[in-house]
């Protein structure tokens, strides 16, 4: 029985790992879509509002077609879960808005720095709130990452408010999603449902303020805004699936994937400046990831 349970746990971890890696790959390339939308004169709050509405409609359709609406009703009957999800939704919305602002103001490098910080915040939450412990080599990998983050901060100069905001809001969102008893799809539907009145209210406000439907009147812009729905919902569904099957420390290290892609996009696509200090920190962060991954693979092989 113990071996069967161990095999099941490993399969759960494998599926969670695959989902987590895919989610972070998709997030890594998300700035390209945002840049295309923002270049058409769309305000960051409108982009976030549209992300919310289109995500809600997409996930709602998936649940209805899949006959899974009972999951949503079950969660809504639990007031404590709804209250936690409302808090998670606020952190999620704040994270979205900060990230879109970073893309709009050509600060994708600082945004990537924020997501390099985020794993350390995840580690802290995992240890302090969930009693998770690190192995010896995991401690080494985290120490290397901390050195890299210190170098990155020196290279940026000043207080990186965007980076800190992204790191803290997403870490708290991840923690809350891990502790809420809800499927990934049902959880995302409720989160976007809770945010929808604010999103719709802001869109209506801009229509009344400007006397026009603005970017929603242009077919090309509307199509790009519509694409923010699946671009938002798919990685979040994968993330919620993964975070319920993996330790927060593991999720924290996986998160290096997205900022690494964003880092390269900032330099190669958006034309942001790369100096030797930032390059050094980037190399150390990848070294940290290699150490952590190698240790995890060795321990998993021993477990089997």
Image (spheres, rainbow, N blue to C red):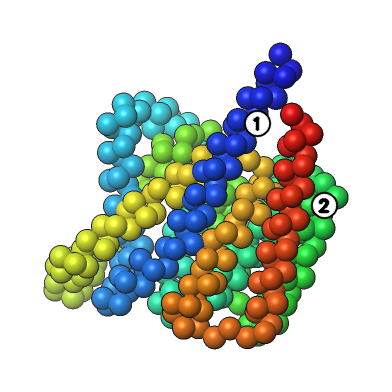
- For label 1, the SS is helix
Q: Position of residue 34 (x, y in %)?
A: 37, 68
Residue 281 disc label:
none
Q: CA distance from mark 1 to mark 2?
A: 21 Å
Q: Position of residue 72 (x, y in %)?
A: 39, 32
Which residue is at a point 78% across and 65% down the rendered structure image?
144
Q: Where, by quadrant of the figure, is residue 253 drawn?
A: bottom right
Horizontal side, residue 181 vs residue 77: left or right: right
Decide: few, some or many residues near mark 2? Use Cα within 10 Å; few <14, some 14-19, many ≥20.
Answer: some
Looking at the image, which is closer to me, 38 or 50? 38
Residue tagged 1: 10
Question: Is residue 46 in view?
Answer: yes
Which residue is at a point 32% across and 29% down the rendered structure image?
66
The answer to whether residue 6 is above or below residue 301 is above
Q: Where, by quadrant of the figure, is residue 8 drawn?
A: top right
The answer to whether residue 298 is above or below residue 303 is below
Residue 137 disc label:
2
Which residue is at a point 74% across and 29% down the rendered structure image?
304
Q: Position of residue 12 (x, y in %)?
A: 59, 32
Q: Quadrant of the N terminus?
A: top right
Q: Which residue reaches farthest top?
A: 1
- For label 2, the SS is helix
């Amino acid at each position: 029985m113990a071996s069967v349970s161990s095999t099941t746990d490993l399969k759960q971890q494998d599926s969670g790992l695959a989902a987590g890696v895919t989610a972070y790959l998709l997030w890594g390339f998300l700035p390209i879509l945002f840049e295309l939308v923002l270049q058409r004169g769309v305000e960051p709050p409108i982009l976030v509002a549209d992300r919310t509405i289109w995500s809600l409609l997409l996930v709602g359709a998936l649940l209805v077609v899949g006959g899974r609406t009972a999951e949503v009703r079950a969660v809504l009957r639990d007031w404590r879960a709804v209250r936690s999800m409302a808090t998670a939704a606020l952190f999620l919305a704040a994270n979205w808005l900060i990230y879109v602002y970073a893309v709009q103001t050509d600060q994708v490098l600082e945004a990537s720095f924020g997501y390099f910080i985020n794993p350390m915040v995840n580690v802290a939450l995992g240890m302090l709130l969930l009693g998770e412990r690190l192995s010896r080599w995991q401690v080494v990998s985290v120490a290397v990452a901390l050195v890299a983050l210190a170098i990155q901060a020196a290279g940026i100069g000043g207080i990186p408010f965007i980076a800190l905001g992204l790191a803290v809001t997403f870490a708290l969102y991840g923690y809350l999603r891990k502790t809420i008893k809800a499927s990934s799809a049902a959880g995302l539907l409720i989160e976007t449902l809770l945010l929808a009145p604010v999103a719709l209210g802001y869109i209506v406000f801009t229509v009344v303020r400007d006397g026009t439907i603005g970017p929603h009147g242009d077919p090309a812009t509307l199509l790009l805004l519509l694409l923010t729905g699946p671009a938002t919902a798919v990685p979040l569904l994968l993330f919620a699936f993964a975070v319920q099957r993996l330790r927060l420390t593991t999720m924290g290290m996986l998160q290096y994937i997205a900022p690494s892609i964003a880092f390269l996009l900032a330099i190669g696509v958006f034309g942001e400046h790369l100096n030797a200090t930032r390059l050094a920190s980037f190399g150390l962060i990848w070294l940290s990831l290699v150490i952590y991954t190698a240790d995890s693979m060795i321990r998993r092989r021993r477990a089997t």
